[in-house]
Image: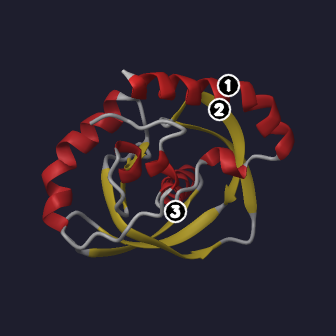
C-alpha cells in the first residue's frame, strides 16, 4: 500500500460507509503494516486510495480498527496540539481540536463500540475522522500559518505531480 499525498483527489473525497467487513479484514494486516512502517499513529482508508469510512489508530495502547465512525458528543472546550500527517509529509503545525469526544464505531467484524476519548486519543480520532470527509489538518490552520507553510505545501504537490508522470 502506498500513502497518497497532498494533491491526490482521493484525499478530498467524502468516503462511503463500509458495508463489506470481509474486505476490511482482508487488508487489515497490510493496512496496519503501512501505518507502522510510515511511523504513523493513525491511517485513514482514503490515504491509501480507498474511499471508504475506516481508519486505524494506535494511541500507545495498541492498534485499533475504526469502521464507520461517528462523533456523537464533544466538549465545548478546545485545545491546541501539534499535528502532522502522512499525506502532508514533513509539515507540522498546531491544530485546535475538541478536548474530548464520545464516539461510536464498528470494528473490522462489524461489532459496535462506544468510547469516551480525551487528550491524545481524542486528537488522533478527530484527525483521522476528518480524512473520511476529505478534510486535512492543514484546513484547520489560520491564514497566517497557512501562508507560512504555503511553499512547503506547494513543493509536496509539485513532487506528487512528478511522481504521477513517471
Q: Which mark is residue 14?
A: none
Residue at the spot of label 2 = 92
- Give the residue drawn at x 20%, y 49%: 28
Residue at the spot of label 1 = 152
Left-right relation of 154 to 134:
right
Left-right relation of 161 to 22:
right
| Secondary element at image label 2 | strand
Circles 2 and 1, Cβ within 8 Å, touching? The answer is: no
Q: Residue 14 at x, y = what percent?
A: 47, 64
- Label 2 Cα crowd, 10 Å radius (few <14 / some 14-19 / many 20+): some
- Give the residue drawn at x 57%, y 53%: 123
The number of callouts visible is 3
Q: Residue 8 at x, y = what percent?
A: 48, 42
Residue at the spot of label 3 = 133
Mark 2 / mark 1, whichever is N-terminal: 2
- Label 3 Cα crowd, 10 Å radius (few <14 / some 14-19 / many 20+): some
The Cα–Cα distance between marks 2 and 3, rounded to whole angstroms, is: 21 Å
Left-right relation of 2 to 10:
left
The Cα–Cα distance between marks 2 and 1, rounded to whole angstroms, is: 11 Å
| Secondary element at image label 1 | helix
Amino acid at each position: 500500500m502506498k500513502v497518497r499525498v497532498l494533491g491526490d483527489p482521493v484525499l478530498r473525497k467524502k468516503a462511503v460507509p463500509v458495508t463489506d467487513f470481509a474486505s476490511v479484514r482482508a487488508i487489515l494486516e497490510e493496512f496496519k503494516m503501512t501505518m507502522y512502517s510510515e511511523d504513523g499513529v493513525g491511517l485513514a482508508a482514503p490515504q491509501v486510495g480507498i474511499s471508504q469510512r475506516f481508519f486505524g489508530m494506535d494511541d500507545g495502547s495498541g492498534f485499533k480498527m475504526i469502521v464507520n465512525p461517528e462523533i456523537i458528543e464533544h466538549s465545548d472546550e478546545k485545545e491546541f496540539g501539534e499535528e502532522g500527517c502522512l499525506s502532508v509529509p514533513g509539515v507540522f503545525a498546531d491544530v485546535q481540536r475538541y478536548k474530548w469526544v464520545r464516539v461510536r464505531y464498528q470494528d473490522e467484524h462489524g461489532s459496535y463500540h462506544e468510547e469516551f476519548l480525551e487528550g491524545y486519543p481524542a486528537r488522533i480520532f478527530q484527525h483521522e475522522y476528518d480524512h473520511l470527509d476529505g478534510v486535512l489538518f492543514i484546513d484547520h490552520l489560520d491564514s497566517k500559518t497557512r501562508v507560512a507553510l504555503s511553499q512547503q505545501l506547494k513543493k509536496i504537490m509539485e513532487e506528487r505531480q512528478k511522481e504521477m508522470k513517471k
